[in-house]
Amino acid sequence: MWDMPRDNTSHDTTGDLSDDGSDPPELLRDLDRRNAFQLMIGDSPHSHVDLDDPTYLEYEYIRQIAFMVDLAAAPKAPLRVLHLGGGGLTLARYIAVTRPGSGQQVVEIDGALLDFVRRELPLPRNARVRLRTGDARDVLGRVPEGAFDLTITDVYSGRRIPGHLTSAEYYGLSKRALRPTGVHVANLADGPPQGRGLAFTRGQVANARHHFAHVALLTEPSILRGRKFGNLVLLASDAPLPLDGLVRRAASDAFPCRVLHGAKLTEFQGGAKPVADPDSLWSPEPPEDIF
């Protein structure tokens, strides 16, 4: 979430209250695409889904994650993927279509949201996707060791990432769940006014580097410079990341982004240290007028 939604939408469907009593999910029809919808919870966009073309990815950060999905193995080779955070299942749909036969699990704490999405935005036929209701960290700690090629963390409570999903210990649980060549992927959100200096993201880089040998950060230049609030995609693995491919895709996207790694990432991290559970923080509150 947090990529700016386009305003070419119309109201379509509203669900029941979420399990925690928060705003119900709502679908806005994308007027530019025949069978596409934006999933909203309150005033926050959570997903964009094109039911006719699951390879169409509207949000920039989702495309950035998809760069890693595309490069994680040979084209069309199936992957084992654990999605922590469900939303509209946009990436699960993308993987099901671009990598047929992939075994995927999606963990979402809000069962009412999962039911709404399952009913209103059905998954592609033959998609091997298991939907699970539960807390992301609890489930991550119980999955078999070395079971996944990718773990993708995209969890928000309201407009922020919960603190128990931002600690060094959480990164350790993700590493445990991954195969030796697997990749930890996280959608972060940071920036002014509360996130001046991107201290939250610097701490996340330190967490990743504490557990993984190779780390990269993708985001647009204005976010990296601290000029605006937005998404940053963190990649971490014990195997070398496909940096050349990531850089090419990042440069050729409709909204080009930067790929920080190596010395540039060390410079960005500065003096930030890993953040343990007792000191873990929620991500910064976004500006009130972000949408």
Image (tube, rainbow, N blue to C red):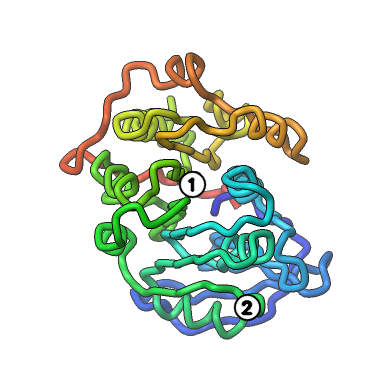
The residue lying at 35 percent from left, 29 percent from top is 209
Q: Secondary structure at mark 1?
A: strand
Three-letter residue code for mark 1: Asn
Is there CB contact under 8 Å for labels 2 and 1?
A: no
| Residue 237 or residue 219, whichever sits in front | 237
The residue carrying mark 2 is 126
Residue 133 in view, yes or no: yes
- Residue 272 spot, x, y in % from top left: 32, 23
- Residue 118 spot, x, y in % from top left: 55, 81
**Horizontal side of residue 71 vs 155, given as left or right:** right
The residue lying at 49 percent from left, 30 percent from top is 240
Query: In the rendered view, would you say 162 is above or below 138?
Result: above
Label for residue 47? none
- Residue 75 spot, x, y in % from top left: 68, 50
Q: Nearer the viewer, mark 2 or mark 1?
A: 2
Q: Earlier in the sequence, mark 2 or mark 1?
A: 2
Residue 199 in view, yes or no: no
Three-letter residue code for mark 2: Asn
The residue carrying mark 1 is 187
Query: In the rendered view, would you say 139 is above or below 235?
Result: below
